[in-house]
Image: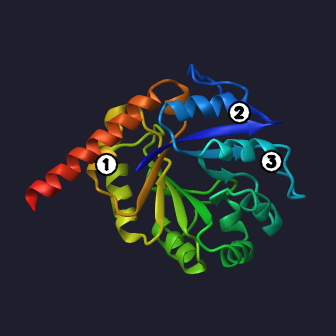
Amino acid sequence: MQLIPMVYVKHKKAVRPEGSKTALFSEDPLEFATALKEAGIQTLLLHDLNLSTLAKSENESVVSDIRKLGFTVHVTATFRTLASVEFYLKKGVHLCLLDAIAYQEPDFLSEVAKAHPKRIAVSIDVKEKKLHIPGWAKPSHKTAEEHAKEFRDEGIYAIFYSDVGSDGVISADSLLSTKRFCEGSLNRIFLTSEIEELHDIRKILSLKLPRLEGLVVNKAFYQRKIDLKSGVDYITNILEDSAEETIAEE
């Protein structure tokens, strides 16, 4: 499992979220990415705030330059057409992450999944045990698991999944439902649940979630609740200890 920082990009500059305190931040996306690289980060989730309906973005060069630093790059944006998805896939982006459009336009979802298998991901967000879809006034009548199965049947490769309590961060209940979701899913999983401290990472790893690829860090990183290098080292040490225990048992 990897730690994957969310990086916001607008008008060719990195955007500092409100309340950000991290000393690693720089408006220069390449300087920011270089600092993240030095902290041990290998993969980034970029949120392009400029992608237009014409399938163009002034942040095109930013993504290309960051990839040259050796990062695996996933992108989320207001994807609304196949052309807008292909705009980034042609730049070497590994996954394009769809948001509410995946629920609103099933024909579009099917189109992009068939055109680019293993390159499309969808967000599934659960809060207080209820599926939350941005822009929807009414709750979905389907469960997160039911939507995940439909996405899988359409050819979606990965799910970016969050499951949090009423305070917006992980809880004992949300961890249990996260475990159930991951065990029932055949997709690659990236967790986007907000965490508060390094110990939350241990809680997640202790679940031994199948097909877990990474943990996206957003507020915890920007608000300096988690030091990225410490987080990367923490994950490495836990995984190494787990591997040694497995070998010893054998």
Label annotation for residue 29:
2
Sooner in the amino-acid sequence: mark 2 or mark 1 = 2
Any part of residue 172 in sight: no
- Residues under numbered marks 1 and 3 in contact, where contact means CB atoms less than 8 Å apart: no
Above/below status of 231 relative to 148: above
Q: Which residue is mark 1?
A: 205
Q: Quadrant of the C terminus?
A: bottom left
Nearer to us: label 1 or label 3: 3
Number of residue marks: 3
Percent position of residue 161, x then y: 50, 56
- Displayed quadrant of residue 30: top right
Residue for point 55% across, 35% down: 37
Percent position of residue 204, x then y: 33, 47
What kind of residue is marked 1? Leu
Above/below status of 184 relative to 201: below
Percent position of residue 31, x then y: 67, 28
Q: Which residue is mark 3?
A: 60
What kind of residue is marked 3? Glu
Residue for point 60% across, 62% down: 122
Distance from disc 3 to disc 2, alpha carbons, whole Å, reads 12 Å
Residue for point 33% across, 58% down: 209
Percent position of residue 123, x then y: 58, 58
